[in-house]
Amino acid sequence: MSHSNRRVELHLSPLLNFVGDVNLLAFSPAKQPATQTSSLPSLYIYAPVTELPYLYTVLAKLGFECYFNASNLQEWQGLNVCFFKKQALSSQQLQALQLAEKQGAQVCSLQSFIEQHLQWVEVSLLDAEYLLEIEKASSLSKKWPDRLRRLFDVAVGSLLLVVLLPLFLPVALAIRLESKGSIFFKQLRTGLYNQEFEIIKFRSMYEDAESNGAQWACKNDKRVTRVGQFMRKTRIDELPQLFNVLRGDMSLIGPRPEREVFIKDLESVVPFYRFRHLVKPGITGLAQVMYRYGASAEDARYKHRYDLYYIRHRSWFLDLKILLKTVRVAFTGEGI
């Protein structure tokens, strides 16, 4: 099930007027998202009472049918039971979770449940405990160790460079014929552990495109040349980054590297944005094949969900899926 075109606005709502016991609160979304092809499962959530208004707002917009802090259920077998901020739960809530698990319910954290069914990390629900799990997963991964990944990057990157090198000459000629300036474009980006490096791309904009300062790329961007528009749709402008991969600055797959000037703005509106720097940036990534070309802070927030999911769950199988989807994006022109 693809969620690549889902747009979800997340914000704090005013406190809701609950009727009766807030611990028995339940809701069903009035309308499922338009792109949703099958109904999401209902779930029972145990969370601190003070968190319920916010959880209601977030989960209603994601399309889940939820029941909060149920205290009168006798049969738990087959139900989906989640917890949020487990350390802040009461002894009664913890006992309910234990009973549910003993009777055969599927018990897990709310964030894990969302990951399983939506294949992203809901950044609005992040907490310190979960972020530590992400950091541990990124540094202690046994499924796809860094040394093996590096060998994969060098081997596949070298092969791709040899195969695609014949494209460099006609692309360079097209760039030079349309507009003055250099063929390649170099720019500082932030990578692993917040270290900056110089990224290499084919130039897709006019030479003085940022004379008025750094700007987000967008659809129908007037700064982009006609050749640049084609290169962006097919991702040809990214090919010189294979040299960055061989040099060790980047990996074939990972979160896209961003400019520090944008990162400083994004980390004030996107929770824990710099956690994406726990791994090397990539030429392509999960966010790139699941979402359109990023053009705003709102897009960056949405893509951050996929970047965190990738860091937590990265494996050789997931990397292979991303590579195959990248080929599809390049041939179908699903870029900007």
Image: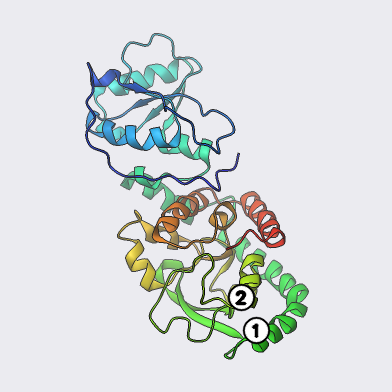
Do the CB atoms of the residues marked 2 and 1 lie less than 8 Å apart?
yes
Question: Residue 128: in sight, yes or no?
Answer: yes
Mark 2 = which residue?
228
Front residue of 244 and 164: 164
Residue 142: give x, y in percent of width and height: 56, 51
State the count of labels.
2
| Quadrant for the C terminus in the image | bottom right
Query: Residue at image x 55%, y 82%?
Result: 185
Q: Secondary structure at mark 1?
A: helix
Q: Nearer the viewer, residue 175 or 129?
A: 175
Is 214 left or right of 285, judged from the image as shown?
left
Q: Residues within 10 Å of mark 1 (few under 14, many from 20)?
A: many
What amino acid is labelled 1 in the image? Answer: Ile
Mark linked to residue 175: 1
**Residue 240 makes an appearance in the image:** no
Mark 2: which secondary structure? helix
29 sits to left or right of 94:
right
Residue type at mark 2 is Gly
Determine which quarter of the picture holds residue 270. Answer: bottom left
Establish if 295 lies above or below 167: above
- Residue at the location (43% across, 50% down)? 134
Q: Position of residue 119 (x, y in %)?
A: 53, 42
Q: Closer to the N terminus: mark 2 or mark 1?
A: 1
